[in-house]
Image: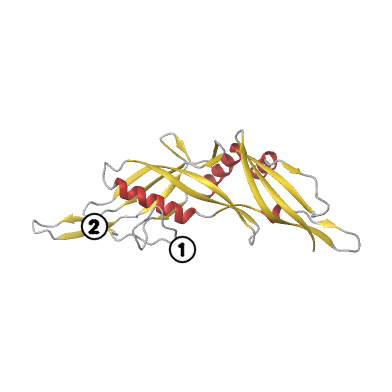
Amino acid sequence: MLNRSVFLLIAVIIFAVNANAQRTEITISFSEQFFETVVDAMFQHGGPPEFSIGSKRPPSLNAPVPDRERTTLAVSYPYSFIPESKWGAYTPRAKCKESIQLLREISGVRTTVRFRDGKIFAPLAFSGNYNPPLVGCVPFAGWAESNLDLEFDEAGQRLIARAKVLNVSLAGTGGVGGNVIARLVQSSIDRRINPIEIFRLDKVSFMLPIQNSGRISMKAVGVRHTVENGVLQVHIAYDLIKG
């Protein structure tokens, strides 16, 4: 079903080849319904994505994350504590699984992809648990408003996207740790989701046979995109090379 949807929703238009530069351009169109199908398949067949929250340093909304630090660690409070006596001694109880789980939908907000005002938006519904000190395990839920920036990975011959969280709306925390949770959510999503591979450009390449001379193949050398009328159009420039 998914493969059929891909072929139905992707329109490939080959523009005229510049004979001197031996370069051509292909346009692939994606509708919002295509991404709805992909997200549905992800939740139905793979289960809700889940990842831990926290890091070795306080989360920052602006600081870049080095590649060597992309794997997040548990935060500093793995236990909930309850008073044992009036003298302030504390006893640990059950561990709190501090994590974020992406959901298909919450409070009418669906995890999906939307095309608006020339941009790619990706609302992300989620739930999770956070364990602030001396409070206990706090469940939370909400959604993150994010957009997707497309990038061309020429070395890997891939089209990738990076999700940038713009705003986090929370519910269910009872007012406890709302700002901290919002920063943890943003930091964790930025770290754990990026980069997102949209597709490999060599999968849409063509091999053209030449009599007694081997083959001419297509190598992607540039990508640009436009968003118009609820459709994402990805324009891929290819060089025609022998090999």
Relative image position of residue 78 (x, y in whole percent): 29, 59
Q: Colour scheme of this structure image?
A: secondary structure
The residue lying toward the viewer, choosing from 75 and 154, is 154
Query: Considering the image in quadrants, where does the C terminus appear?
Result: bottom right
The residue lying toward the viewer, choosing from 116 and 79, is 116
Relative image position of residue 137 (x, y in whole percent): 28, 51
Q: Which mark is residue 93?
A: 2
Count of residue discs: 2
Apparent side of residue 13 relative to residue 139 in the rendered image (left or right): right
**Nearest-to-viewer mark from 2 and 1:** 1
Q: Secondary structure at mark 1?
A: loop
Which residue is at 71% across, 40% downward? 11
Q: Residues within 10 Å of mark 1 (few under 14, many from 20)?
A: few
Q: CA distance from mark 2 to mark 1?
A: 35 Å
Relative image position of residue 96 (x, y in whole percent): 31, 55
Q: Residues within 10 Å of mark 2 (few under 14, many from 20)?
A: few
Apparent side of residue 6 relative to residue 196 in the rendered image (left or right): right
The residue lying toward the viewer, choosing from 26 and 98, is 26
Which residue is at 50% across, 42% downward? 122
Query: Considering the image in quadrants, where does the N terminus appear?
Result: top right
Relative image position of residue 144 (x, y in whole percent): 42, 43
Amino acid type for the residue under numbered disc 2: Arg
Which residue is at 19% across, 60% downward? 91
**Dividing the picture into quarters, in which one does residue 36 lie?**
top right
Residue at the front extreme of this rendering: 20
The residue lying toward the viewer, choosing from 213 and 106, is 213
Q: Which mark is residue 39?
A: none
Residue at the left extreme of this rendering: 86
Residue at the bottom extreme of this rendering: 68
Q: Secondary structure at mark 2?
A: strand
Q: What residue does disc 1 label?
A: 66
